[in-house]
Structures are given as C-alpha cells and as structure tokens.
Image (cartoon, rainbow, N blue to C red):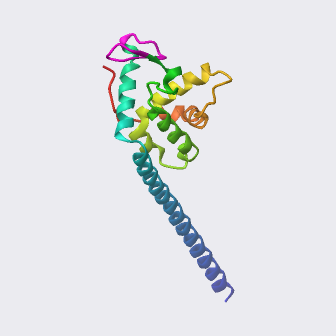
C-alpha cells in the first residue's frame, strides 16, 4: 500500500507540474496577444492623429533638409528658394507649420509605453518619420537656450535608449532622398 501511495503522489505531482506549465504557457500567450492588440490600437491612434497634411509637411521638410544636395544640417531650402532653419521650425510662422510639433508631441506622449508594445510594427510604419524627427529634436537639444522649453525630452530619451534596436529594423519610406 505504501508503494501505491508513493506512485499516486508522483503522478499527482507530475500532473500538477504539467498543469502549471500549461497555465503559464497560456498566460504567456495571452500576454503576447494583448501586446499585439495594444500595438494595433496604438497604430490606429497614431493614424487618427497624424493627418495627410502633416505627412505632406513632413515630406516637404524632409526633402528641403536633404544634406545630399549640399544643404546644411539645420537648414531647409525650399524649391522657391526660401531658406528656414530647424531653430525656427517651431516658431510662429515657421516652416513646420505646427504639423511637425504635433507629430513630435504625439510620439513624445507615446514614448513611455512604446517599449511595452510590438515596437517593430510601429517602427515599420513610422520609422522614417520618427528617425528624422529625432535628428531635428536631437539637434535642437544641443542648441537650446534657457528660454527654450523642450517639449520632446521623452521622445529623445526613448530614441536614445532604443538606438541599438532601431538600426536593424526595416521601415516604410514616405519619401526618398533625391
């Protein structure tokens, strides 16, 4: 009878271990599914808050800030010959027209939670935009004066923290250097 109880204990323990393993795997899969759902909700949120006009402003500024055509890093040279700078982009009447500021605000607001999402999906969709916005805000963070109140610190911090990850990820192109 003692052998039977030992065998019964072993089977019970084995079933408990298997049950625990299945429960943990189910929980892990559920967390992964939630992460994916939250990522798609975030992408929908971003799509609703970045309009086509804002995307067109980005494309215009990206092309006007093309260093391949001998434009200084902090300058925007437009097809009509006007020149603007990154420092003036966010001022009243600056070339950013408020659109770039709004995009940076959006990504800055989302930055603390992006590492809890499937970042690869978000980067694929908005990587070129985020990367160029970071170039501009990173430049500004180096030339800020005491009067300037940065609105992009969360965004810059996130981009610095994820630099290693971002370098190897593909992203959609909204415009090409040309």
Residue at left offset 65%, top offset 21%: 145
Residue 138 seen from this side = yes
Q: Position of residue 117 (x, y in %)?
A: 50, 49
Q: Position of residue 104 (x, y in %)?
A: 51, 36
Residue 171 seen from this side = no
Q: Is residue 18 above or below residue 77?
A: below
Residue at left offset 61%, top offset 34%: 153
Corner quadrant of residue 24: bottom right
Q: Is residue 25 above or below residue 66?
A: below
Q: Is residue 117 above or below residue 70?
A: below
Residue at left offset 47%, top offset 16%: 73
In the displayed orientation, state which residue is furthest to the top: 70
Tell which of 66 and 127 is nearer to you. Answer: 66
Residue at left offset 38%, top offset 20%: 64
Question: What span is colored magenta in the figure?
Answer: 69-83
Tell which of 63 and 68 is nearer to you. Answer: 63
Corner quadrant of residue 173: top left
């Amino acid at each position: 009878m003692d052998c039977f109880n030992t065998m019964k204990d072993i089977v019970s323990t084995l079933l408990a271990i298997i049950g625990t393993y299945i429960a943990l795997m189910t929980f892990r899969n559920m967390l992964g599914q939630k992460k994916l759902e939250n990522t798609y909700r975030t992408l929908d949120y971003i799509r609703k808050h970045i309009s086509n006009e804002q995307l067109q402003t980005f494309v215009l500024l990206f092309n006007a800030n093309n260093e391949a055509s001998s434009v200084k890093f902090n300058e925007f040279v437009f097809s009509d010959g006007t020149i603007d700078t990154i420092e003036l982009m966010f001022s009243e009447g600056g070339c950013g027209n408020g659109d770039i500021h709004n995009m940076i605000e959006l990504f800055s607001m989302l930055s603390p939670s992006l590492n809890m999402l499937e970042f690869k999906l978000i980067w694929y969709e908005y990587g070129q935009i985020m990367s160029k916005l970071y170039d501009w805000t990173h430049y500004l963070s180096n030339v800020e004066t005491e009067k300037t109140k940065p609105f992009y610190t969360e965004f810059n911090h996130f981009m610095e923290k994820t630099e290693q990850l971002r370098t190897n990820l593909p992203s959609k192109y909204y415009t090409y250097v040309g």
